[in-house]
Amino acid sequence: MEGPKLNIAIMVCGHWRDGRRCYENFVNRIKGPNSHHNLDLFVITSGVDSARGTVTGKTYMNPVGEVKHDKKYYKKHGLIYNVSKDELKKEIEEVYKEENLIGVYLTEEEIEDNNINPMSWEWFRRGIFSKPFYGMQKVKEHQKQTNIKYDVVLRTRPDLILRQYITIEKPDENTLYTFGGWKPWVHSKKRRWRALHKYMVDFFAYGSVDTMETYTNIHLAKEPIKTGRRKHPFQSEWQLCLYLKKHNIQRNFILNKRNLYNIPR
């Protein structure tokens, strides 16, 4: 039985990568189960693209200029390169032509922005967390301009493959619906950290407008939350867990097995 019809803003955030091939999965796993709702799409990306692979390997789009090594991967693995913003926007609009695409928004990003320690808080803050924050500003602007009131804001990424259907229901306040619940790959030996840190992803979540505004505002944190870990203390997923706890936001794991999603890079 279908629940009440909801107004849902879907923010597709991140480098475009293999977004074209992953679109069919988006239609089947996210759009399809929620087609009775009003779905608005906001795509937030940049003129920089990246891929996992050798530096001499295949790029998803035609590079503009030099293809460089993406520092978050081991040497000789990982590509990062500029693309034509006009061609990128044209491709995204063509892929999502059947959707209610509110806009394609390109953040200001340069390859050189990634030339910092990929395990530093600043790298996570400016990278993973910047586009959802920017997208949330666009969602709020659209609400104000059109007098629409969104019941749900959902954050996903262009290159996500799901093996489970996502059914969106009206969220409880101060509750984030996300993926996780399993043991993290970096595991603290201290009991108090183990109890808190059931792994959660940093690329998919939904909740009310207020909850998602708090969620995306992690980008504004100039300093990370101190942890009891020596190895990767500023890891995005770990910081997100601590940040949500600090703001009294509960996590509801709607997908709780790691093999139920994949990110082709």
Image (cartoon, helix red, strand yellow):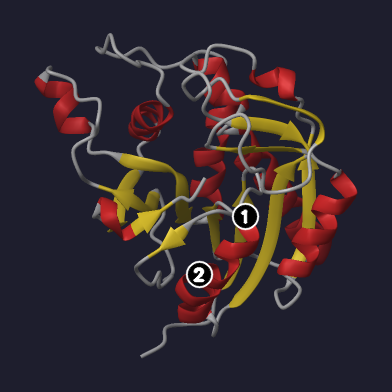
Find disc 1 in the rendering and name its residue.
11
Q: Nearer the viewer, mark 2 or mark 1?
A: 2
SS at mark 1?
A: strand
Question: Viewer-proximal residue, 173 or 242?
Answer: 242
x 40%, y 73%: residue: 167
x 34%, y 28%: residue: 238
x 54%, y 85%: residue: 36
Q: Which mark is residue 25?
A: 2
Q: Indicate the position of residue 128 as horizontal and vertical percent values.
A: 55, 33
> Looking at the image, how many numbered discs can be counted on the residues?
2
Residue 209 visible to an observer of this rendering: yes
Q: Indicate the position of residue 223 as horizontal and vertical percent values.
A: 51, 13
**Where 214 falls versus 179 (above or below)?**
above
Label 1 packing within 10 angstroms: few (<14), some (14-19), many (20+): many
x 74%, y 48%: residue: 61
Q: Which mark is residue 49?
A: none
